[in-house]
Image (cartoon, helix red, strand yellow):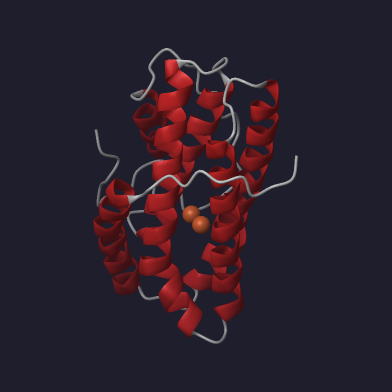
Amino acid sequence: MAVRTKVRRSPEAAKAAAISEAKAIAPDRAARIGSTPATTFRGDPNIFGRLVEDHDKHRALFAMIEDTVGKSPDRVRLFSELVHEIKGHAAAEEQALWSTVLRNPETTEDARHAVAEHKEIDDMFADLAARDMASPGWLRRFAATKEKYLHHIREEEQEQFVAAEKHLSPADMRHMRSVFNRRKSAEKSGAEVERKIKLKA
Ligand SMILES: [Fe+2]
Ligand SMILES: [Fe+2]
């Protein structure tokens, strides 16, 4: 079931819907995401609420992968879903939001920071995809990628989205949501998982 709606929802309902989307991929895995960093955007009917829905789904997928053992079918399926999700999300976020935010001199630095982190995260996933999922080192590397990504989305929610919002009209933010939804599905389905060792042992 898609977590897309035009009406404001409670933060709890929005978070629960995002987690249940992740759970649909592997219903037997626990999705313990715990408490999430404070944000006023969760449940908003505009672009920022939509992006936080994705972030919550990603938080759940990370937690579920940590609930798997070795190269199990669930780990393979969840990892593939997470990489496609994050690649699709990052590309659509750049097209719908960061491109506009970048053009405003007052927020150029915020957009540049977020986009630079997308590239670092992409490299971390390519590195993980190239390594043996069954080895004990894989989960350790996965945990480092998780930490990096959770830092990225916390900063977006608490810093870059907050700065960007000040310069956008309600109409801009609604329009960005529809651009994001359209681009996300195209980018997610077209995403290719690169497999390349990029980080040191
Ligand atoms: Fe991002
Ligand atoms: Fe994001």
Residue 61 lies, with reference to residue 26, above or below; the image says below
Of residues 9 and 189, the one nearer the viewer is 189
- The residue located at (27%, 64%) in the rendering is 179
- The residue located at (65%, 27%) in the rendering is 139
Left or right: residue 7 compared with residue 67: left
Of residues 21 and 171, the one nearer the viewer is 21
- The residue located at (57%, 25%) in the rendering is 133
Residue 12 can be seen in this image:
no
| Residue 26, percent from left and from top | 39, 20
Q: Residue furthest right?
A: 201
Number of numbered tags placed on the structure image: 0
| Residue 129, percent from left and from top | 53, 37
Residue 151 lies, with reference to residue 68, above or below; the image says below
- The residue located at (27%, 50%) in the rendering is 185
Q: Quadrant of the N terminus?
A: top left
Left or right: residue 109 compared with residue 75: right
| Residue 29, percent from left and from top | 47, 16
Left or right: residue 147 compared with residue 96: right
Q: Quadrant of the C terminus?
A: top right
Left or right: residue 150 compared with residue 21: right
Residue 187 lies, with reference to residue 4, above or below; the image says below
Of residues 90 and 120, the one nearer the viewer is 120
Residue 78 can be seen in this image:
yes
| Residue 64, percent from left and from top | 51, 24
- Residue 143 location, quadrant: top right
